[in-house]
Image: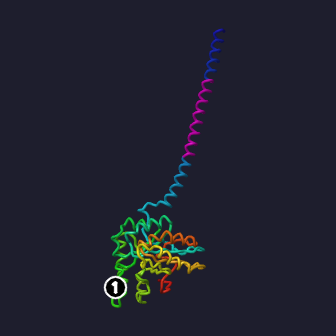
Amino acid sequence: MRQSRRSQAKNIQSSKWKWLIAIIAATVVLTIGGLVVSNNLFTQSASSKELLVLKAEAVSVQHWKVPTKQQPISAAPKDPPGPAQGKKVVYLTFDDGPSAYLKQFLEILEKEKAPSSFFFVGNEFPNSDKATFQRMVNSGFVIGLHSYTHDAKQLYRKKNPTFISEMSRERDKFEELSGIRTNLIRAPYGSTYLTKRQVEQTKQNGFRLVDWNIDSNDWRYSSGNSDAVYQNVLSQVNAYAGSDEPLVILFHERKNTLEALPKIIKMLREKGYVFQAYHENETLHENFHKDPNL
């Protein structure tokens, strides 16, 4: 009988220990499971946040910092630009480069955030390089053509004028040198020298011509006379007071122009003008022939 009671007591004690062990084991399992679940949730949450950040960065990089290899090298945007609505717009244009002053012009214009258009002469191409040309386009500048020789006696002579052939030759050569294909041109001394036939040939060959409505006459003044350049531009700009007509100003890559440029830009800003570069598919048609298709 005693033996039976002892055996029964042992069984009860053993049963209690089993239950205790089972409870402890269950507690351990639940605790570990909870930690694992919490960790997974935290990891997933962190991953989601990281993913959002990466996506945001990807969009930012793609929009603002497209690698050079993926950038289309072109002197004109796909969408036709035009004078900003409700704004007084000025187009700064520079002829006869690339010169020894080109990079200094770019530094001033970049600093002032004043995109502009440059018209190069083929014989002057050796004065610059591909890196500078691509820098210009990537910075919002536009490059146009200004003939190969700038020689009026050849360009506009009565027999076999070279205007179209020089522009075509220069277009191909510039693309070879820079990777940039541009159809924007400016006739040396202005398009008034072009015959009706040359105007039609200009269109047929896919060129877009631009003249100007303000002439800085910078070529008339000595290299140290920057104030004369400034005063000449100022007087002509004042003649447009009260008008919202876009201004296309003719400059040349000269030292006196370089020295006058910061003051000219400041003056134009104070008069309420904003700066744009003239593109080959510009909606504004500024030419002496008043031709909306030129």
Instruction: List x then y, in percent, for residue 143.
Output: 42, 72
Magenta segment includes 287: no
Q: 9 or 69: which is nearer to us?
A: 69
Determine which residue is flagged by label 1.
154
| Residue at (48, 70) in percent of width and height | 261
Residue 185 seen: no
| Residue at (37, 83) in percent of width and height | 164
Question: Compared with residue 211, is residue 45 higher up or lower down, i.e. above or below?
Answer: above
Quadrant of the image occupied by residue 160: bottom left
**Where the N terminus falls, by quadrant?**
top right
Q: 224 or 56: which is nearer to us?
A: 224
Question: Compared with residue 41, is residue 190 higher up or lower down, i.e. above or below?
Answer: below
Instruction: List x then y, in percent, for residue 24.
Output: 61, 26
Span colored in magenta: 19-46
Q: 123 or 215: which is nearer to us?
A: 215
Instruction: List x then y, in percent, for residue 173.
Output: 34, 74
- Would you say 269 lies left or right of 125 here? right
Label 1 neighbour load within 10 Å: few <14, some 14-19, many 20+:
some
